[in-house]
Image: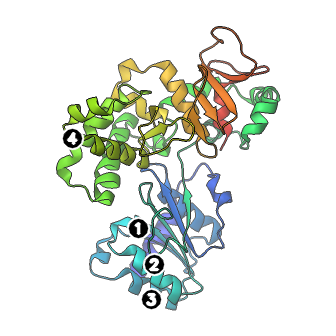
């Protein structure tokens, strides 16, 4: 136990968290079992350590961070460890990589009942189904999703600003005033291209090759978050990798499932399931017409965020695809997106039609649509700067 406390103290003292994540204020920390899901690379470990530092400090032994990658748990039962920590006065246990332990759900459920004053906060893959499926903890866990940096968080970090998040309805109603206030302090377009290329994943701050790191992260998403958690044999990894490549190099696309099944030499049903797994791993997004959803074929498939577009085919990244991918990614956290109608790209919350444009509106300006414009600092009327939607979280 003492070695875990020493590791906890060192990690909390040295955690580098230059951006305070908005999720920190959204979580109901009074709950006794909290799951923090998120794709690989978005900063879940840092998030847990930041919480420990802010709420307890490095020396308070009532809080402890552990990682279930530790070989100690190959021999010791997690529930025994938790109950020992509780008897020693532990009141908040932070568990990283929880899915690496085989019976974690059963043992957390047991400790929830045997340790009534203990708060357990764990991190895990975005592929995990904490509330959607019946499990020993599905009725007692509160589940949250940690996303990569928004453009607002990236801008605040890089420009030293402190802009708050903005609601969608406020943008639609007052975007000119909101954008004018931002531009008065900083020119967001000077940072927007960098964000689209490398700003979503916090590890861009590390002194390593970002593209190489991102490729490794994408492969880990497939090898661990999909194969390991979904218990798929390793021999199927090349098919999943090939499918991701085919979708990525044509996105946004309407997937031809029959053609994809021929390309990766598997059944149509398996292709559809693999597409869903890639979506759960936060590698792609799926856009459906109104009133349709999985397992129906999506109308279009996008990569999950713009950063993923550049390592796969950097020489042929389509600017329009980047615009649409950014818009989808930044809105889908708190909004419902469907395939647009009447030549629009997206229908948002079943009432707002959006066309994603370059610098100007092509064709006739339809007053019933909203137009998002790239390379535009301040919009007017129904024309809104694309970058401003990056302030939604």
Q: Where's residue 134, x and y in %? A: 45, 69
Q: Circle 4 sits on which residue?
A: 266
Q: Which residue is mark 1?
A: 98
96 left or right, relative to 140: left
Question: Residue 24's x, y, as percent?
Answer: 64, 58
Left or right: residue 107 versus residue 238 is: right
Residue 234 falls left or right of residue 303: left
Query: Disc 2 versus disc 1: distance between alpha carbons?
Result: 10 Å
The x and y percentages for residue 185 are 76, 30
* Mark 3 surroundings: few (<14), some (14-19) or many (≥20) residues within 10 A: few
Residue 284 in the image: state x and y as whole percent.
43, 39
Q: Quadrant of residue 96?
A: bottom left
Residue at the disc numbered 2 = 108
> Marks 3/1: CA distance?
18 Å
Quick one: label 1, few (<14), some, or many (20+) residues within 10 Å? many
Contact (CB < 8 A) between labels 2 and 3? no
Comparing labels 3 and 4, the label whose residue is closer to the camera: 4
Q: Earlier in the sequence, mark 4 or mark 1?
A: 1
Select label 2 or label 1 by which is in front: 2
Distance from disc 4 to disc 1, alpha carbons, whole Å, reads 32 Å
**What residue is rendered at 50% in x and 70% in y?**
138
Q: Are marks 2 and 1 in contact (CB under 8 Å)?
A: yes
In this rendered view, identify the residue nearer to me: 241 or 136: 136
Quadrant of image for the N terminus: bottom left
Residue bearing mark 3: 84
Residue 175 to residue 130: above or below: above
Looking at this view, is 29 or 190 the one in front?
29
Work out which residue is located at the far front of the displayed protein and give it: 291
The residue depicted at 65 percent of the width and 11 percent of the height is 360
Circles 3 and 4: CB atoms closer than 8 Å: no
> Which secondary structure, mark 2?
helix
């Amino acid at each position: 136990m003492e070695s875990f406390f020493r590791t906890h103290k060192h990690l909390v003292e040295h955690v580098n968290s230059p951006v305070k994540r908005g999720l920190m204020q959204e979580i109901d920390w009074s709950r006794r079992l909290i799951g923090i899901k998120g794709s690989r690379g978005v900063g879940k470990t840092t998030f847990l350590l930041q919480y420990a530092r802010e709420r307890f400090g490095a020396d308070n032994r009532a809080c402890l961070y552990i990682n279930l990658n530790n070989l100690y748990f190959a021999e010791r039962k997690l529930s025994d460890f938790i109950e020992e920590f509780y008897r020693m006065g532990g009141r908040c246990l932070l568990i990283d990589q929880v899915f690496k332990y085989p019976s974690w759900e059963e043992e957390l459920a047991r400790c929830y009942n045997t340790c009534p004053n203990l708060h357990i906060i764990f991190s895990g893959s975005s592929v995990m189904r904490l509330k959607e499926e019946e499990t020993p903890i599905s009725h007692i866990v509160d589940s949250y999703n940690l996303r990569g940096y928004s453009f607002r968080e990236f801008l605040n970090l890089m420009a030293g600003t402190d802009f708050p998040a903005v609601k969608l309805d406020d943008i639609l109603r007052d975007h000119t005033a909101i954008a004018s206030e931002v531009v008065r302090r900083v020119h967001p377009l000077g940072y927007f291209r960098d964000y689209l290329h490398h700003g979503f994943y916090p590890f861009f701050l590390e002194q390593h090759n970002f593209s190489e790191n991102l490729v490794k992260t994408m492969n880990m998403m497939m090898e661990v978050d999909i194969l390991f958690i979904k218990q798929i044999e390793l021999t199927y990894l090349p098919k999943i990798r090939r499918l991701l490549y085919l979708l990525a190099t044509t996105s946004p696309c309407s997937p031809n499932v029959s053609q994809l099944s021929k390309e990766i030499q598997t059944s149509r049903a398996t292709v559809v399931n693999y597409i869903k797994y890639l979506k759960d791993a936060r590698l792609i997004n799926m856009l459906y017409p109104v009133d349709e959803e999985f397992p129906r074929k999506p109308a279009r498939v996008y990569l999950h965020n713009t950063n993923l577009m550049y390592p796969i085919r950097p020489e042929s990244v389509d600017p329009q695809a980047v615009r649409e991918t950014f818009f989808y990614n930044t809105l889908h956290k708190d909004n419902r997106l469907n395939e647009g109608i009447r030549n629009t790209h997206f229908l948002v919350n079943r009432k707002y039609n959006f066309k994603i444009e370059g610098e100007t509106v092509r064709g006739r300006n339809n007053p019933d649509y909203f137009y998002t414009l790239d390379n535009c600092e301040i919009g007017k009327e129904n024309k809104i700067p694309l970058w401003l939607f990056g302030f939604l979280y």
